Amino acid sequence: MRAHVSIDQPNVVEYDKYPYLTDLLPDEIRQEMKQAPIRSADDLIALYEWFIDRWNGACDGRLRCAVSCSAPQRVTTDYLARLNDLSREHGLAYYIHVLETKLQRVLGREKYGKSLVRYLHDQGVLNERCNIIHSIWVDDDDIRLLAESGCTVAHQPLCNMKIGSGVMPFRRLRDHNIPICLGSDESNTDDSANMWTVAKAAGLIHKLSDPEYRNWPKAPEILHCLIGGAARAMQLTGQVGMLKAGYEADLILLDLNTLNFTPLNDLRRQLVYCEDGTSVEMTMVAGNIVYRDGKLLTVNEEAIKAEVRELMATYGKEIDAISDSAARLEPYYREMYLRAAAQNVDMNRWVG
């Protein structure tokens, strides 16, 4: 495959990542969180330096490193800045989850006295290497800063629906010429990680949040986000994303004789709204065929599935323990969530 991979490790105390939580938690739980081990910025940077030295540019350049702070409120300002230094030094993408939820909008106001986009800007971190993930609860000032920075925004429509984050203001970002790519976020917030269904969701969800149909995304726009936006997000513009001499041969071949394309009326619309992956006949990465006729050619799928099933026997016990811990914390997190949801932030990103 072709992949950019980052280490995603927060390094602040759990209750500092949220509004109101410090006061809501009982002393016993707050002390447990305070005593939980946290890696220092020095340790994490040392790990990144090893990671970059070991993997950046591996496999003939198909594998590259990126950096990530997860989200700005989850790391110290020192670590946030030092990751930016690594990004600049090595020309790496910087992945940051920003304003995914209304709660994070409230957190910015309560903790920093500003939005998290403005906070990143003031820290000197918001730039063209940034991949700003979500950007749902953004206001006009945030959108202006995103546009001026040259960053890419990663739209995660299925994830946003599954965990109730809200609807990103797609048209307003596009009108400010902000590059947009599409993503699935983590497996627990999308489940399938199927980019065909992500594209379809991106084409549909915005029709529920704006009655002006001229603002609704068009199929060619969604395809551009899916392909050209992805190249931009991976710092690979001019290298992937087009059938053109000098570009990497990353290709997907589809069978137009499937029901998804029968009859063939509008190729771009059917790619967005009909295709789900079942028409894919062949996939090529850097000129090498890695999938054909329903089979992956470079890994043993059956062995991997068997390993996953075996591991779940052990993970099942861990999941039970995690569920018990979550049940203990849920009343305090719910109170925090409801308190933030009740705040007036001068915008609404929920449908209805």
Image (tube, rainbow, N blue to C red):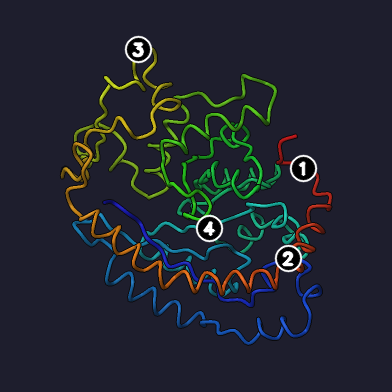
Q: Residue 90 versus residue 229: which sits nearer the camera?
A: 229
Disc 3 element: loop
* 126 over 210 or under it: above or below: below
Instruction: Please provide percent x and percent y for residue 226.
Output: 42, 37
Instruction: Please provide percent x and percent y for residue 89.
Output: 38, 66
What residue sits 37% from the left and 60% below the top?
5
What residue sits 64% from the left and 45% below the top?
136
**Residue flagged by tag 2: what amino acid is it?**
Tyr
Q: Earlier in the sequence, mark 3 or mark 1?
A: 3
Residue placed under numbered mark 4 in the picture: 96
Question: Badge 1 local density, few (<14 within 10 Å), some, or many (20+)?
Answer: few
* 242 over 137 or under it: above or below: above
Real-space Cα distance between discs 3 and 4?
Answer: 42 Å
* In this rendering, the label closer to the viewer, 3 or 1: 3
Q: Residue 14 versus residue 49: which sits nearer the camera?
A: 14
- The image quadrant of residue 22 is bottom right
